Image (cartoon, helix red, strand yellow):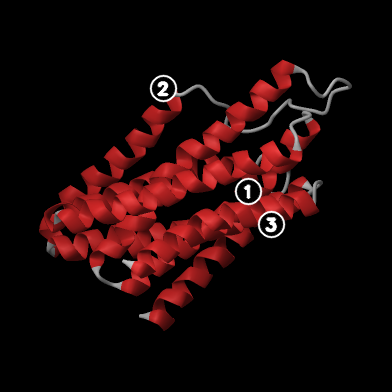
Amino acid sequence: MKLVLLTALGVGGATLLGAILGFMFKKISHKLGDIILSFAAGVMLAASVIGLVLPSIEIGGGEKALPVAVIGIFLGALTVNLLDRLVPHLHKLSGVEPESHPEGGGKIDKILLFVLAIAIHNFPEGIAAGVGFGTGDVSDGLIIAAGIALQNIPEGMVIIAPMLSAGISHRRTFLIAAATGLIEVIGTLLGYFAVTLSQAILPFALAFAGGTMLYVISDEMIPETHSHGSERGATYALLIGFCLMLAMDVLLG
C-alpha cells in the first residue's frame, strides 16, 4: 500500500513538475512540444498494452478471457468519449492568442475549458495506474505509472503559459495545475482499492483501464502532435518512447 501511495503522489507530482518547468520555460516551440508529447504517447502506448491489456488476458485465462478484454477496452474508450461529450471543454488551445486586455473573460473561459479537458483525462489515467498494481506484479504497476507520469510532464508544461498570458495570477495558475494532478492521485487510489476489493473484476478492470489510455493516445495525443508540421519527428519520438518502455519491461521482468 505504501508503494501505491508513493506512486500515486509521483504520478500526480509529475503534473506539478511539468507546471514548474512551464513557469521556467514559458515559450516552448510547437516542434519541441510535439516531440515531447509524442514520446509520452509512445510510453503510454507500451504501458497500456504491456502493463494492462496483455495481463488482462493472461490473468483471465488466455483465450477465454479475450472477449472480456475486448469488451473492457471498448467500454474504457467509450467512457472517456462520453466524458468528452458530457463535460464542455476544449481539446486544445487553437485560436487562443494573447490579447491586449489579458483579463478578457472569453479567453480565460477557453483556457479553463482546456485545463478541464486535461483534468477529465487525468482521472481515468490515474485509475489505470492504480489498477496496474492489482496484478500483484510491481513491475507492471511501475511501468504503467512511469508511462503516465512521463505524459503528465508535458501536459503540466503546456497549461502554464496560456493561463499566465490570460492574466491569471501565478498563485492561481499553480493551484489549478496542482488540482489536475490531485485528480490523478485520487484516481490512482480508487483504481487500486477497486481491484483489491474484488480480484474477480481484475481482468475486466485492466482491459478497461487500457481502453481509456488507448483512447486518449489516439483521440488526443497523436492528432495534436501531427497538427503543426512536425509529424515525422513526432512519429520517431513515439517509437523511441514505445521501445524505451519495451526495454524497461524486459529488464524489470
Q: Residue furthest bottom?
A: 251
- Pick the quarter of the image with the C terminus: bottom left
Q: For residue 45, what is the image quadrant?
A: bottom left
Q: Which mark is residue 233?
A: 3
Q: Position of residue 90 (x, y in %)?
A: 58, 27
Amino acid type, mark 1: Gly
Which type of secondary structure does the marked residue at label 3 adopt? helix
Which type of secondary structure does the marked residue at label 1 adopt? helix
Q: Is residue 115 left or right of residue 58?
A: right
Q: Is residue 133 left or right of residue 173?
A: left
For mark 3, does the 10 Å Cα neighbourhood hold few (<14), some (14 to 19), or many (20 or more) residues? some
| Image position of 200 with respect to 251: above or below | above
| Image position of 116 with respect to 55: above or below | above
Amino acid type, mark 2: Leu
- Pick the quarter of the image with the N terminus: bottom left
Q: Compare residues 2 and 35 and report the one nearer the observer.
A: 2
Q: Position of residue 235 (x, y in %)?
A: 61, 56
Q: Provide the residue designation for mark 1.
A: 156
Q: Compare residues 20 and 236 and report the one nearer the observer.
A: 20
Of callouts 3 and 1, which one flags the residue occurring earlier in the amino acid sequence? Answer: 1
Amino acid type, mark 3: Gly
Q: For residue 62, what is the image quadrant?
A: bottom left
Residue 93 visible in rendering:
yes
Of callouts 1 and 2, which one flags the residue occurring earlier in the amino acid sequence? Answer: 2
Q: Provide the residue designation for mark 2.
A: 86
Q: Compare residues 85 and 179 and report the one nearer the observer.
A: 179
Q: Residue at x 68, y 37 (%)?
A: 172
Q: Residue at x 40, y 32 (%)?
A: 81
Q: Residue at x 40, y 80 (%)?
A: 252
Q: Residue at x 40, y 47 (%)?
A: 186
Q: Position of residue 103 (x, y in %)?
A: 79, 21
Judge depth for marks 1 and 2 and give the one in front.
Answer: 1
